[in-house]
Image (tube, rainbow, N blue to C red):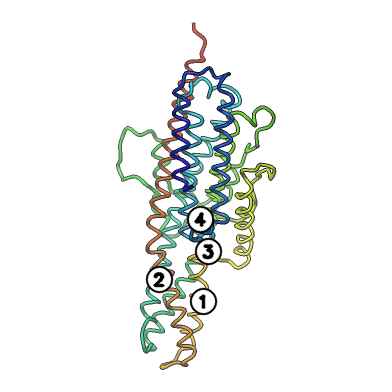
Amino acid sequence: MPATEYQGSFLGRISIRRNQVIAMDGNHEQELEDLELFQRHVSDRFADLLSPPDDVPADALLSISWLRRLLDVFLCCEAEFKAILLMGRDPSQISKPPLDRLIPELLDRAVKSLDLCNAVTSGLESVRHCQKLAEIAVSALDQNPIGDGQARRAKKALVSLISVMNHDDNEGANTKSTERSWSFGRRGGNKDRTPEHLRSLSWQVAKNWSAAKQIQSMTNNLVAPRGAEATGLASPVYIMSVIMVFVMWALAAAIPCQERTGLATHFPVPKQLNWAHSMIGLQEKIGDEWKKKEKKGMAGLLEETQKMEKLGQSLIEFTDSFQFPGETEKVKEAAAQVAELAETCRRMEEGLVPLQMQIREVFHRIVRSRTEFLDVLEQGGKSSAPLV
């Protein structure tokens, strides 16, 4: 069943149940059923990301299309999570232990996720710049016959491409693309916004900011609930926290971000949790690829940029030794590589803007949900306050 169908049927189920006037003590079994269904949906969605069904075209791990599917999973899981915790529920229940501690911790992770969304969005600008350089090389080499001038033009673009890709993460804040304020909102927006909201929507990277440390800080206090808490509302809060950390971790691994040293370090997810098996499998695969990246000095794990780098290196060798009219076999081999590079550019042209739009949607969803939870916490605090 597609993720959206899962979500629609699940939200309908929750809505019907919460509209029934039933005492909470008598509704515990239904709560357990809802939690079990949520866990099953999370497990199934990540299983599809790890090993898609035979009737679904497989997307390469950390390709643009795969990342878009990952963000779809996040949005669906987040909607179901919010339904479990908030839909038709008395706000005072959210203000009781252990949720009075776990929800603020989740909201803190949400704020850190906003910064990572901004960082990744800026990184996508670097990826788009690489795409444009690759397109210049394709345009120059997609000729028959290739002249010395075209070979020199292509080489210049490809050398710039590889240079941009190998740019050190630590130097990211000094590039022109990140000197500007990172923002999803318009300049001079609503004056009624709070300073915190403005910071979330218009954030400029500091020189000492680290994507790896940001993600590491999101794992603070991320501990699986035990005992009675494992079957209560603490469980979906933990699940959603893990999903949020994993999604931000995968985005930072794929797309250039400032200072990602040590990103391969796995955040703790207990292996005995059935819903997490596929996520752990993805985590191990991405972690292994990241360790190779740190050795090779690649720009990131995005499938398209890795392919672009490999083809770019090979075509630099071709243009470096090219003299008109060129050796027939080498020209033929280069033509095949140019065609492959052109196809990669085409996929990036089609996918990068929708990916940016999805990250924007995730950003705003997190902002809205955080506001909703803060409102509920405030209402719960008022309702539980003793009368004077």
Q: How far apart are the alpha carbons under marks 2 and 1?
A: 13 Å
**In which image quadrant can residue 274 be found?**
top right
| Residue designated by label 1 | 313
Where does the image place residue 363, in percent across and percent down from the top left? 43, 44
- Vertical placement of residue 142 versus 135, above or below: below
Choose the circle earlier in sequence order: 4 or 1. Answer: 4
Determine the secondary structure under disc 4.
loop
Determine the secondary structure under disc 2.
helix
Q: Residue at x 50, y 58 (%)?
A: 55
Where does the image place residue 83, in percent across and percent down from the top left? 47, 32
Q: Residue at x 50, y 55 (%)?
A: 257
* Mark 3–mark 1 CB contact (< 8 Å): no
| Residue designated by label 3 | 299
**In which image quadrant can residue 222 be found?**
top right
Q: How far apart are the alpha carbons under marks 4 and 1?
A: 23 Å
Where does the image place residue 226, in percent across and percent down from the top left? 68, 32
Determine the secondary structure under disc 3.
loop
